[in-house]
Amino acid sequence: MSVLPNRDRQAERREATRREIVEAAWEIARAEGLSSVTLREVAARVGMRSPSLYTHFASKNAIYDAMFGEAWSEFLQVTLERTASLPKAPRVALLAMSETFFDFAVADLARFQLMNQRVIPDFQPSPESYAPSVATLERLREVLDRLGVDQPEAVDLYVSLVGGLVDSQLANDPGGDRWRRLLPRAMDMFADHLGLPGPPLRSTQRST
């Protein structure tokens, strides 16, 4: 007869409440902006008094920290899945990776801002929550190195190039694809600059 380990139901309930609090904070951020997240509003959405939140999170920044870690953990998983089956051609692989980040970023403005922009002046992620972002960058560097992008400055250029297009899309054409359609051209320019092999992406994809 096997004996099942005792379940810590109190810990399970506590974790469920923490998840509910974080989800409520995301709902507020997506509807009204990250700066609109307040302990009072979060507490109201989960049906508790503001002081009760302190039994789960020490401060509002602690909630932001959980949101930050959750967001980067989600993208790390997306990155691992996408880079496990990239096309072999360097330019096509670069485009696939850039489209993956672009689509993830523009799908959720509040999430992108918390992950990549300093919109909360006094917020600094904890090492634990920051770890998935570090792991994501390490994976990116591994893949880029395999594609022939092996200089730190080139990695920085790639990140800035794709991130800049995301910023322009969100600022000027939210919900559209004006800047997404520039990704093939941008990756061609990047690949040409580094001398990466392969026919131009623009020769196989119509750009309008």
Image (tube, rainbow, N blue to C red):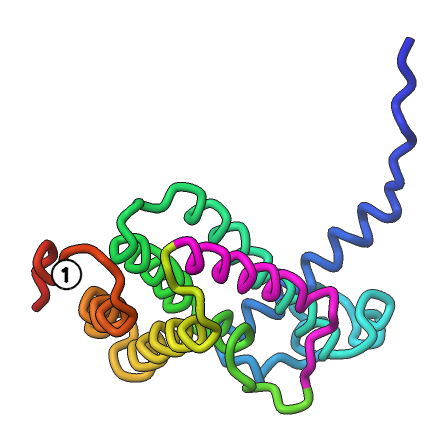
Position of the C terminus by quadrant: bottom left
Report if residue 124 lies within the magenta region: yes
From which residue to which does the magenta span run? 123-146
Task: Name the residue located 48 percent from the left edge and 60 percent from the top edge.
Answer: 140
Residue 166 position, x and y percent, is 35, 74
Residue at the spot of label 1 = 200
The image shows residue 178, relative to residue 124, as above or below, that is above
Q: Main secondary structure of the magenta part?
A: helix
Considering every residue shown, the one lying at the far top of the view is 1
Residue toward you, 207 or 186: 186
* Total numbered labels placed on residues in the image: 1
Task: Name the residue located 21 percent from the left edge and 67 percent from the top edge.
Answer: 188
Task: Give the left or right position of residue 12, taking residue 80 as reference.
Answer: right
Q: Would residue 179 be seen by someone viewing this image from the given angle?
A: yes
The image shows residue 152, relative to residue 2, as above or below, that is below
Task: Give the left or right position of residue 185, taking residue 82 as reference.
Answer: left
Q: Would residue 177 be seen by someone viewing this image from the given angle?
A: no
Position of the N terminus by quadrant: top right
Residue toward you, 116 or 26: 116
Q: Secondary structure at mark 1?
A: loop
Q: Quadrant of residue 67?
A: bottom right
- Other-residue count near label 1 (Cα within 10 Å), few / some / many at <14 / 14–19 / ≥20: some
Residue 39 position, x and y percent, is 72, 78
Report if residue 142 lies within the magenta region: yes
Residue toward you, 141 or 29: 141
